[in-house]
Image (cartoon, grey):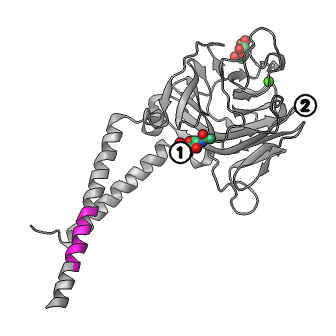
Amino acid sequence: MAYPTPREIIILCIFFCILNIAMGEWNTRDFQRREHSLVKPYQGSGMNVPQWDFLGSTMVTNSYIRLTPDRQSKAGAIWNNVPCFIQNWELHVQFKVHGGGKTLFGDGFAIWYSKNRMESGSIFGSVDPFTGLGIFLDTYSNHNGPHNHNHPYISAMVNNGSLMYDHDTDGTLTQISGCEAQFRNRDYDTYIAIRYENNKLTVSTDIDNKSGWKECFAVEGIKLPVGYYFGVSAATGDLADNHDVISVKFYDLDGDDADKTAPYIGLPEASVMEAPRDRIDDSKGSYLLGSMTGWKLFVIIILLIIGIGVCVMVGVMVFQKQQENSRKRFY
Ligand SMILES: *[C@@H]1O[C@H](CO)[C@@H](O)[C@H](O)[C@H]1NC(C)=O
Ligand SMILES: *[C@@H]1O[C@H](CO)[C@@H](O)[C@H](O)[C@H]1NC(C)=O
Ligand SMILES: [Ca+2]
């Protein structure tokens, strides 16, 4: 058997490196975007957190960002200061809501894709009315009338700036959909995923320590313009809780198919207020893989095979060299 010459190895390595760079670029283009993400370690140089601004009671530690402590009448927020010009995206937020209250705790927190950056107010610490999308993780039930549901409760509201949030009904009258979710005081990590793709909004949770997404709701006919900001805000009132954000991870779903939908620049719109709720268990992996088309997977597999091939070849070369060396020593 003829072993490859060093020259051939070098050519192969260069080829592999180029493919690797191509793949790396593809990865960052299709998936996580750092400018809209917030991951540990939070601090850059000095005390500031790159690309994120803080409001109110927010406190940054090494392992979490605490929007409110477990004390009454606090409000805090974090806001991304880079507007989002990606039409289709997915946001994963790792959070922790916890406190000493056994039956009395509140009020909850909100995840925003909004025009109203850094404006404090009465919707979980953020301004009312707002323009954009709000996902509310409400831990305290303000009413016992009709439309009542158990808390904690997750709901979504799309607003063009004209609707006020109705506190007395926990936003039930203006929500596009929602679901109950027992995310408070858990001993393990809790996550929420917000996916906005082709005018469809899907909210899922991973709060049962199962490392898989469970759909909370999915609603079609949602129009959100590009150019708004991501943020998370929280508030306590007579009742309190720690509202912590551990990470925010933004995934770009446009990737190579960026031209599949032209960026929308009108006002936020929802064609329905309430939609039927289905709950489907889905694994975390396939949830993201769902956005990968067949040929991309194929390319990855081919690249992996080439990578393994190069490694084996280098291994053989090194082994042969050692054999030669040991032979030289013996004779
Ligand atoms: C804003 O939303 C409200 C309620 O959904 C609707 O009645 C109104 O027509 C919208 N305004 C604009 C300018 O689209
Ligand atoms: C959560 O799951 C992990 C891994 O499956 C397990 O080690 C851990 O004990 C679980 N935590 C709780 C509180 O159930
Ligand atoms: Ca409430």
Q: Which residue is mark 1?
A: 32
Circle 1 — which element? loop
Q: Residue at x 72, y 37 (%)?
A: 185
Q: Which image quarter is the N terminus in?
A: bottom left
Horizontal arrangement in the rendering, residue 269 relative to residue 284 (left or right) = right
Residue labelled with disc 2: 238
- Counting other residues with Cα less than 10 Å from the Cα at mark 2, is it few (<14), some (14-19), or many (20 or more)? few
Q: Is mark 2 within 8 Å of ligand 3?
A: no
Q: Secondary structure at mark 2?
A: loop
The quarter of the rendered structure image containing the C terminus is: bottom left
> Depth check: 301 or 327 in front?
327
User: Rounded to the nearest whole Å, what is the CA distance between mark 1 and mark 2?
Assistant: 38 Å
Q: Is there a contact, CB below 8 Å, between mark 1 and mark 2?
A: no
Residue at left offset 76%, top offset 23%: 161
Magenta highlight range: 311-322
As drawn, is 60 to the left or to the right of 87? right
The question of residue 64 being in magenta is answered with no
Q: Is residue 126 left or right of residue 231?
A: right
234 vs 173: above or below: below
| Residue 132 visible, this angle | yes
Quarter of the figure with residue 40: bottom right
| Image spot of residue 300 (x, y percent) | 34, 46
Q: Which x, y percent locates residue 12? A: 25, 63
Q: Position of residue 28 (x, y in %)?
A: 48, 48
Q: Amino acid at mark 1?
A: Gln
User: Picture quarter containing residue 8?
Assistant: bottom left
